[in-house]
Amino acid sequence: MSTKKITVTMMLLVAATTVFTSGCFYSTGPTLGIFSVPIPVSPYWQKNQEDKFHIHERYARVPILGPLQAGGPAVALDPPSDDEVWWALERANSVQGGFPFLNEVQRNNVTIIKEKIADYIDPPRVIPLIGPAQLHHAHYKCTIYYTERRIVGWPIPHTLEDEDAVEVVYVDHNHFHMAGDPDFGPASTHY
């Protein structure tokens, strides 16, 4: 036998041994059969689930604060964060970067200006699962100044740059305040 055939045979033997002893194909104990083979997931679906979780974790919950003190300030919580404003802009435009090599969108030199346009409190009422509470509304107008660069790669490659791009996004912040004394119920029920 020639050395070339022996070398090829040994390499095939080493490759087969490596594949079948790696744990992917042969294992002792319980197996999942055909379900043990990984199924690829589209990046679109993965990003969609990550975005849903991000919004739920940070912005979809309404906090319940203690009661308002008589004569105390009744101002809203913090203004919206830059991240929250950016998420609202992306949801409004439904553009999150575009498609690579076909139509890419870049936003640079971003400046965000937040203005409170309304801050008011609803009268107390009974809310299920919370009890007597007041809903505190705060409405913000967020103006976003940025430089937009759109890179088009097909059918005719070109780049468009808008240095004076402006978007306006309205963000609402709502939270609850307990009404009355949280330890004893509404103020009118105890003496």
Image (cartoon, helix red, strand yellow):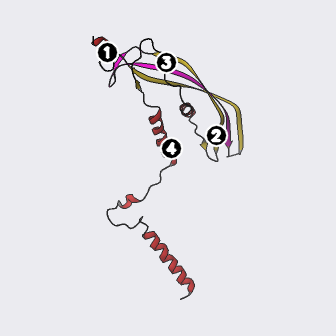
Q: Tag 2, which secondary structure?
A: strand
Disc 2 residue crowd, few under 14, some 14–19, many 20+, Cα 10 Å: some
Is residue 88 depicted above or below 124 in this figure? below
Residue at the bottom extreme, as displayed: 1
Q: Which residue is mark 3?
A: 75
Q: Nearer the viewer, mark 2 or mark 1?
A: 1
Q: What range of the chain is rendered magenta?
A: 122-151
- Which mark is drawn over residue 105? 2
Closer to the chain start, of discs 2 and 1, is 2
> Which residue is at 58% across, 39% downward?
96
Q: Which residue is mark 1?
A: 186
Residue 110 at x, y percent in the picture: 64, 33
Q: Which quarter of the figure has residue 93?
A: top right
> Which residue is at 48% across, 75% downward?
14
Q: CA distance from mark 3 to mark 1?
A: 22 Å
Is residue 146 depicted above or below 131 in this figure? below
Is residue 143 depicted above or below 3 in this figure? above
Q: CA distance from mark 3 to mark 4?
A: 36 Å
Closer to the chain start, of discs 3 and 1, is 3
Disc 4 residue crowd, few under 14, some 14–19, many 20+, Cα 10 Å: few
- Which mark is drawn over residue 47? 4
Residue 115 at x, y percent in the picture: 58, 21
Q: CA distance from mark 3 to mark 2?
A: 38 Å
Disc 1 residue crowd, few under 14, some 14–19, many 20+, Cα 10 Å: some
